[in-house]
Image: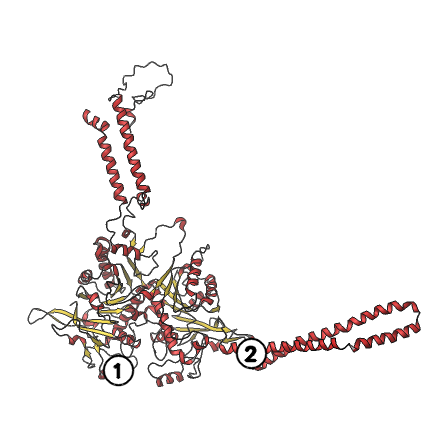
Amino acid sequence: MGPARVLRRSSPLTIVVGVVLCITIFVFLLSPSTADTAASKERSAKAASNPLSPPTSPFRKQSEKANGKRTPPPVVHYKMNNVTSTADPVGNRETVLILTPLARFYQDYWDNLLKLTFPHELITLAFIIPKNREGNSATAALQEQITKTQKLGPEKNRFASIIIERQDFDPPLSSQSEAERHKMENQKARRAAMSKARNSLLFTTLGPSTSWVLWLDSDIVETPPTLIQDLASHNKEIIVPNCFQRFIDTKTKKWDERAYDFNSWQDSEEALKLGAEMGPDDILLEGYAGMATYRTLMAYMYKEGADIRQTVPLDGVGGTALLVKAEVHRDGAMFPPFSFYHLIETEGFAKMAKRLGWRATGLPNYKVYHYNE
Amino acid sequence: MLPRHHAKSDAYSNGYPRAKEKNTYSISPHRFQPRASPPALRRRRQLLIRLALILGIALFAFFVWPGASILPLLSFGFISSGEEFQLETVRYYDLSNVQGTARGWEREERILLCAPLRDAESHLRMFFAHLHNFTYPHHLIDLAFLVSDSKDRTLPLLSELLEDLQADEDPKMPYGEISIIEKDFGQKVNQDVESRHGFAAQASRRKLMAQARNWLLSAALRPYHSWVYWRDVDVETAPFTILEDLMRHNKDVIVPNVWRPLPDWLGGEQPYDLNSWQESETALALADTLDEDAVIVEGYAEYATWRPHLAYLRDPYGDPDMEMDIDGVGGVSILAKAKVFRSGVHFPAFSFEKHAETEGFGKMAKRMQYSVVGLPHYTIWHLYEPSVDDIRHMEEMEDERKAREKEEQEKMDRMKKIKDQFADPNSQWEKDKTDIQNEAMKEKKAKEKDQTSTSKDTEAMQAPAENTDMKSETKVEAKPETKESKAATEKE
């Protein structure tokens, strides 16, 4: 007891240690955070000051106001002459908005998103989810994954911002099963509702700084990780890869793949003739035996081993995966929820874009994969 | 430090306070005995002082060090160590909360006010006067401006006025989110009144306008908006309560009647916005004959559509709440539910059912089964900008007026000259008359009254001069009357 006491009282050692500790703590506190990389600097530079800002950028949480007064939001200038969409989006730091109408949440979809090599600090994700039971569970699953990525995950995986919207109208069908969804008589109502959902999502999230819009359906579970760069490198206003589906062949019991999306096509005389005979509100549909349009479908243009950079002009596009220059949408090209030249949704979009002077392009040998139910 | 080891002489080691009497006898069994020798104690103290000094200097260095701030120290580094703690990256919106209702101000529904601008410097101050006066809660209104292809000071003046607005002392004055969007489309059409309203330029001009509107809307519409209000900056007179007035009708798309005041010689007032109309059979038949890219524009003799126009149905004493279903809408002042725009209705920059811009917007909204309504007896007033014809006419009138004045002046000058050159026979005659009278008086009365007669003489000299002045004045007054009656007959 005696020596211990002496040590505590007299030895300057403890004090020196204490002082050193103090200084290290101060140094630690004052040193800039270790995560201060270029990317995170860009993130914080882009952050807006209030939650009313364009949702494509994060915002700073407002601290409690002094004396409860509202501080009016600042006047913000957006120089849209400087918003470009070029063949080199990474080099030019162009932002991409990934839009997904979400009916069901697939883990594979999210994992595939995380694998994209396009700098995540340039990507904003936006989802629109119906307000029904299925939608609620999809929202819960999505939010769980978002928390994992945005709060706990490594910084390079985090996206610039994420927007979740709940749809303000009910989907026309109670069931989202594949068989029910694809019944011909249900198609028009289903695709009109889908168009409205797409438009709602698009026009509320586009904002003033987006360069590219990537439409990616929630059931696209596999794409090349360089999807955005590859599609953008063609520098086309509207570009669509070929959407396939992997399945197990019941005969050979082996994995095989088949064409899935039939909405990307080149028009035919027969289809135009069919359209001319229709009533103004009727629509032409692809992939149904009762309606032979004889259009040239991109799904069947795929050739194994052919050049993946081969392009074809298209008159109708599918929306499973679709890269669009933001200016096309800004000019007003949207997904008509009504019969527009007897076309609807994504096919109507291609037609409307054409009326505005924009052209659609397809990549028949560049594949993305749809979930198989 | 605990007081246990204090070596102060007046301290008590056992912790019990002694009685105050000084002379109390005490054996004090717990007598304090210092453990260390006095020099050791001193050394330790010196060391402590030195260490404290070093620490102080180190802290001082940190505080004053260039670039180091005190803030991280005070906040313990937790909040500010990385900005990602402060950054919110996830936003959640339920669109069913922003449907738009008849009494939006009670439910705190946000309005997006869109104003496309091009060379609008001269109208901005008037527009901001309107902004100051809106009765809808300002913090619920977000402003979005698109400044395109402007050659005047629109942009600097706009930002200056907006900064002032947001910095206003009155807490009810500042608005919500404010975006100024700068985008040039490469203006191909001249913007002066004449070329703007010329028939040939209409289709391409309106497609460009539509493009500008779409860019503005798509950049500024947010998931939290319930309403979108389109307003031209050149509205001169509008009720302060216009937002509430239009909202109360709870329609998907609603427009007031737009007239403009005119100078008196043109009739005092005139219907201005002819783009709000009901579809007619004639127009539909006409549309079928036109090619795919043609655009029907209202108000030109080239397309006789025989449509009922909202503007012509105005009764100044009519019920301002009366509604009328319309198919095409004018863009001067449109209030629409945000869900209309969300679902994809926009201003077609192509020929949509043979219409473009706001008329195409009305058509597209109808196509999607939204209600499109006009208020024929609720009027706002567009600024009167004289057309080239009007200006010519006004110049002619001005010249005419000047010529007439000149003529007057010449006439008067002539009269004056005549008066100056020739002695006024009147006064001579008066003089003679008085002379004769005087003579007569002289004859009648005594000779002493000679002096009074001379003063009378001078008075008589002044009177006729005044008389002529009065005459010329009435002449000048009479002229404008004839001018007006002439203009009135011209009008008719």
Q: Position of residue B181 (x, y in %)?
A: 37, 65
Q: Could you say which quadrant of the image residue A258 lies in? A: bottom left
Categorize mark 2 by other alpha carbons within 10 Å: few (<14), some (14-19), many (20+): few
Residue A335 circle label: none
Residue furthest out toward the front = B421
Secondary structure under tag 1 reads helix
What residue occupies the far left of the structure in this picture? A252
User: Quick check: B396 above or below B175?
Assistant: below
Quadrant of the drawing holding the C terminus of chain A: bottom left
* Quarter holding residue A257: bottom left
State which chain disc 2 sits on: B
Question: What amino acid type should be assigned to the residue bearing mark 2?
Answer: Glu
Would you name the residue on which mark 1 appears? Answer: A275
Q: Name the one closer to the observer, B303 or A108.
A: B303
Q: Chain of mark 1?
A: A
Nearest the viewer among A57 and A39 is A39
| Residue matched to label 2 | B396
